[in-house]
Image: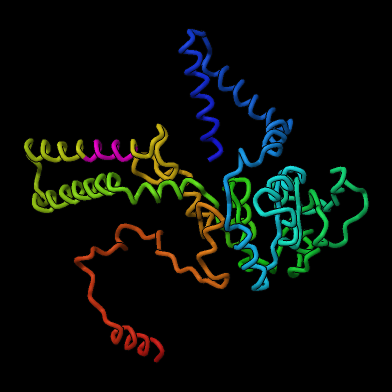
Amino acid sequence: LFSMAECCLIADTVQFFKDNGIPFCAQNAVTDILNAIRDTHMSGDMHKMVAGDPGKYFHPTPHLKEVLENLRKTGKRLILVSNSPFWYVDSGMKHVIGPSWRESWDAVITTAGKPNFYTDTNRPFREVCEDSGRIMFAQVTSLEKDKVYTEGCLKELIRLLDWGPVEEGDNILGVGGNVLYIGDSLFADLVDAKREYGWTTAAVTPEVGFEMELQQENSYIMAQRTIDMLLNALRLLQDVLGPVDRTEEDFQVMESLERLVSKWRDHETTLLGNPFGSVFRARFQPSLFSHSLRRYCDLYMSSVSSLRNYSPQHRFYPEDSRLLSHEIKSPIDEECWDIEDVMDADCDIAK
């Protein structure tokens, strides 16, 4: 998702060159733009600009404090781990939650250096002086609620919080599914948390909120239903034609319907309002991002505030999205069961 902003800046720069008749080498332009983005990010200039006027850059999150309070009431331990420096995190959290935002967290870790935070096994935590922002030299033997820390690693976090046994080697045991990790960067945060440690992961993906709203509009519903109808017509046509060779007329009819499908898919992409289309689709197939989201994330949401609609003890039972074609039953082939059938089957299994 962060690449979307890079693509937009590259496109705007190329358009500027063309509009003003400036000759350029495409490869050099891309290299210079990416270097400029990197230097701006590393210098902290962008962070200072945002922290200086958070109301201009941060979207309102009115229900975040409510979500955190609900989690704490049920005994959940909340830990904030960010790659940003403390002064930047402090500015944003004060704007979103309020000046006492740190009371919601059992531990606050800034400049964590993810994903190395997960892979390093011998990097100690260091305390941050809140007044000066300087890193202190004293050894950290426990994570206190009213203090701020930097660096560290997952192994040290588990040990200091007494989450469970820690193996002397590279393997970290005893945590796994007891942790819900929420992050907004799939490859910097969530992949290692799921792949290496088996944590339950939740991705914050703002784009899903926009697409869900769009999917409720009549124009989008009409486009999707038209595509479904045309694809169903193609399937039915081939069922009628059977296993025999196709005539030239058969091919003309099929290709005519396929062109209509392509036309309506283009229209559906146009409705999204951007030239890149959906981040979840590459044309009509799932995108790499979509595949990775499905593989490494148990949940995804447009905002952490979405959790306010669920109890902290809620159990999710998602649809099985891993089905292969031969495992998917047509509605026509499905049998009708009532509750008595289900109970009888359950009794048979118990026997």
What residue do we see at 16% from left, 37% from top? 255
User: Position of 96 compared to 205: left or right?
Assistant: right
Q: Which residue, as the protein is rendered here, is positioned at the far right?
A: 138
Q: Which residue, as the protein is rendered here, is positioned at the far bottom?
A: 351
Q: Position of residue 35 (x, y in %)?
A: 65, 25
First to last magenta residue range: 261-269
Asked if residue 17 is positioned above or below residue 94 in the image, the reply reads above
Residue 265 in the magenta stretch? The answer is yes
> Would you identify the image quadrant in which residue 104 lies?
bottom right
Q: Position of residue 158 (x, y in %)?
A: 75, 63
Nearest the eye: 17 or 74: 74
Nearest the eye: 300 or 47: 47
User: Position of 86 compared to 3: left or right?
Assistant: right
Q: Position of residue 225 (x, y in %)?
A: 23, 50
Q: Position of residue 101 (x, y in %)?
A: 72, 56
Residue 184 in the magenta stretch? The answer is no
> Would you identify the image quadrant in which residue 323 lies?
bottom left
Nearest the eye: 174 or 310: 310
Total marks drawn?
A: 0
Q: Considering the whole magenta stretch, tell me its main secondary structure.
A: helix
> Would you identify the image quadrant in which residue 334 lies?
bottom left
Quadrant where the C terminus sits is bottom left
What residue do we see at 67% from left, 48% from top? 95
